[in-house]
Amino acid sequence: MASAQGVPRLGHVFVIVGENTSLSQITPAHAPYLANTLKPRAAWLANYHSLRHTASLGDYVGMTSGQFTKCEANDALPIHCHQTVPNLFSQLDRVQIPWEAWNESADNACDFVDHGAAWAKNTFSAHHQPAIYYTNVEGGKYDESITPTPECLHRDLAMGSTGPNDTAAFDQAVAAGSVGDFNLVIPNDCENGHDPCGTHDPVKQFDDFLAREVPKIEASPAFGSNGLILITWDEGADPPLNPTHPLALAIGPQVQPGVYGSQRFDHYGLLRTIEDGYGLSHLAAAKQAHSISGIWR
């Protein structure tokens, strides 16, 4: 059944976000799983763009609320930079659609403090976790002595322990089908393409993460006939590569594989697509954005 702008009704959605990689870097040499395994069965959005005039955090907040502030454009921590604004998570709450944000190397639920190390393969960056920046999710009291809201404790989760690249809790939930309808998956800085962490190929590290996790998601009893995996990056790499031209791709039973380059899409359009698929209203800049269209069966 099609919803707004031709987006089908969505079931379990997994949005996986990498870091700092331009489309031109997604090659068989650096991203063999993406280029050789996923591309032939995905909608490959070759004209997809991140948001202008912002660093990472603004992109994450933009794709979950349709806007960002100057503070977020500067990657400030949530203790300095949180908003009471409508966002995708509160929208889902309002219509009782369960969601979860999965954060690799978080040391507990609702973690809002940077920690870890590249050598230990557990670098956690709070400014890559958008849910904790919304007051109506976290509660607005960023103090380690104050317990966050039950909403944050039950929805903004660690993927596993702070051991090296540990996703055991997420993997167990996926295998059991006990995940939210909407899932935002944020690898740590060793697996999202941000830091080399000893391999000298950050792009390959995210590719390896996808090769490990995507098959588990597709095999989950939660995925079903209307499951969807959306993979994108916060932004492209630094110049001379194009910093606002990452890739996005969609995988699922309702997706028609192919390379799509004629229509321009961006993070606001990704938000609108999710809103359309769940029958939600459009937030801020998502009102003027184009839903991801032309890719559906």
Image: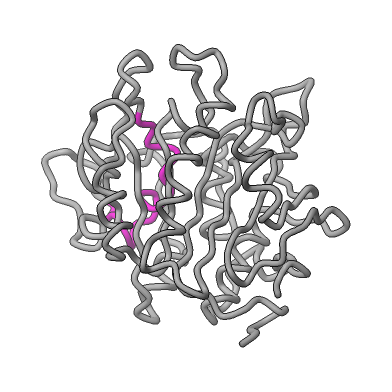
- Foreground pick, 97 / 134: 97
Q: Nearer the viewer, residue 67 or 217?
A: 217
Q: Quadrant of the N terminus?
A: bottom right
On whether residue 138 falls in the magenta region, the answer is yes
For the residue pair 215 and 234, the one nearer the viewer reads as 215
Taking the spot 62% from the left edge, 78% from the top edge, the residue there is 8
Picture quadrant where residue 207 is located: top right
Magenta region, residue range: 124-140
User: Looking at the picture, how far across and down is residue 234, in whole percent?
Assistant: 59, 41
Q: Is residue 297 above or below residue 74?
A: below
Asked if residue 184 lies in the magenta stretch, the reply is: no
Image position of 126 with respect to 175: above or below = above
| Marker count (numbered) | 0
Magenta span main SS: helix
Estimate the x, y position of residue 273 in percent, counting from the top left. 62, 68
Which of the two residues, 14 or 83, is positioned nearer the viewer here? 14
Tell me if 19 is positioned left or right of 93 in this view: right
Residue at x 27%, y 65% (from the top left corner): 178
| Above or below: residue 43 compared with residue 29 | below
| Residue drawn at x 68%, y 39% as measured from the top left | 35
Q: Residue 54's image quarter?
A: top right
Instruction: Examine the rendering and report whether any part of residue 254 can be seen.
Output: yes
Q: Residue 293 sits in which quadrant?
A: bottom right
Q: Is residue 289 above or below residue 33?
A: below
Q: Residue at x 11, y 40 (%)?
A: 145
Q: Residue 29: percent from the left, percent from the top? A: 68, 24
The spot of residue 25 in percent (x, y) is 71, 29
